[in-house]
Amino acid sequence: MVHTFDVDGRYFALDADSGAVHMLDKMGFDAVSAIQSDGWDKARETCERAYGKGETEELFADIRSLQEQGLLFSYDAQLHCPPEGLGKPTVLKAMCLHVAHDCNLRCRYCFAGTGAFHGQRLLMPLEVGQKAIDMLIARSGNRKFLELDFFGGEPLMNFDVVKQLVAYGKERAAERGKTIRFTLTTNAYALTDEIIDFLNREMENVVLSIDGRKEVHDALRPTASGEGSYDVSLANAKKLAQARRQQKYYVRGTFTRNNLDFANDVMRLAEEGFEQISVEPVVLQPSSPYSLLEEHLPAILQEYDRLLKLYLESRKTGKWFSFFHFVVDLDGGPCIKKRLSGCGAGSEYVAVTPDGEIFPCHQFVGREGYRMGSVLTGELDEDIRAKFAANHVLAKEECASCWARLYCTGGCAANAQAFNGEINKPYKMECAMERKRLECAIAAYCSENASEQEPGAGA
């Protein structure tokens, strides 16, 4: 399968199976597109009418050569047939600890009901966190490196327990010859110098939630008392990013229907000095006044194109930053099994609530039918684990003909379930945005890495 697309007047072709990317001139673009849609013979006739027989013969010879090299119109059987072990639960490798079902902010678009996950406001007791870590280690098999994310709500509301769990996890993991890589997600409002020092010492990565422009952020992320949180969160986040030398963190924003010009929020974060940036689309039911609807999609896709231009210009002129969705590894990337199986939610990765209940991931917490067990009793529903393990990209009908499936790995199961009632039916809005971001990422990579050459059939 070959996907052809144009970005800002430049033409590209992605060979889905090999991962090869080709920069094309208009004739090459027309030819490859026609071959993909109409077949070789009809495409040849179309190109001969448009460009003449001589040039068409030369171009098609080049395309055939690329096909023989496995770089265009290729077919890799292992990407279409499940490899051994795919679709079956394996060991646990990661856990999301909800150390706080409470928050010091009251974000209006919060999927977790302003931090309480539509239930009681709770903090995780130390003993529950210790039981969770024990389960992660016990069920990790021969895996040496494990991951544990402190999440909420706002995890800094339970900071003493976070500190104790880090010490406990390091000790228990060392006893088994393992290493736990800790991460934490915070709105940055409660950061202090003491906390920043601890996070920089102990956390492999930190995610900081800020929405970009002050007016956008304060309208949707007020404190519990109704005040704007931007100034405090921004100052604290900048201090942490600088202390981490602009590495191993992300500042993460959210855009809603109220700021479809979200490229301005990305650029504001870059102007504030952040070098690791992610701004994500909100995911809410259509009834929410902040939700993104299908009618907003053309504007969103156009905004990603505008963001790409601003992004490349900024990096070229010395204001370097990385935008999460515009980074793609065209030279390597994850192994085949990982590209087919996705994030591992519900199978390799689970979330634990303050009272010890287990769910497939942080977004499934509280959803009926998705409770998997409890760290207090040690139970873990293997039927649910098997269901999620089997939810790989090759098992999804909608993904079979999608050129992007080896990059998005089938999309988010939680979003699929929320909008379609089934984890194996991808959320179409997410699919459309992911495809556009991937096109922009490929264009960005080629702009900055491809050697200067005459455009043709291949790059």
Image: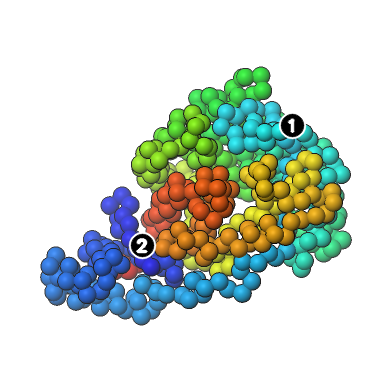
Whole-percent x, y for residue 19 in the image: 44, 67
Q: Which mark is residue 140?
A: none
Q: Amino acid at mark 2?
A: His
Q: Nearer the viewer, residue 160 or 459?
A: 160
Disc nearest the viewer among 2 and 1? 1
Q: CA distance from mark 2 to mark 1?
A: 48 Å
Q: Secondary structure at mark 2?
A: strand
Q: Which residue carries the number 2 mark?
A: 3
Q: Nearer the viewer, residue 17 or 454?
A: 17
The answer to whether residue 244 of the structure is visible from this angle is no
359 over 60 or under it: above or below:
above
395 over 412 or under it: above or below:
below
62 vs 206, left or right, is left
Whole-percent x, y for residue 13 in the image: 34, 63
Q: Amino acid at mark 1?
A: Gln
Residue drawn at point x = 77 percent, y = 59 percent? 179
Q: Earlier in the sequence, mark 2 or mark 1?
A: 2
Q: Which mark is residue 120?
A: 1
- Dividing the picture into quadrants, the one containing residue 112 is top right
- Around disc 2, counting alpha carbons within 10 Å, would you say few (fewer than 14), some (14 to 19), or many (20 or more)? some
Whole-percent x, y for residue 71 in the image: 39, 73
56 vs 69, left or right, is left
Residue drawn at point x = 39 percent, y = 59 percent? 446
- Looking at the picture, the colour scheme in use is rainbow
178 vs 222, left or right, is right
Q: Quadrant of the N terminus?
A: bottom left
144 over 270 or under it: above or below:
below
Q: How many discs mark residues in the rendered view?
A: 2
Whole-percent x, y for residue 338 in the image: 58, 64
- Around disc 1, counting alpha carbons within 10 Å, would you say few (fewer than 14), some (14 to 19), or many (20 or more)? few
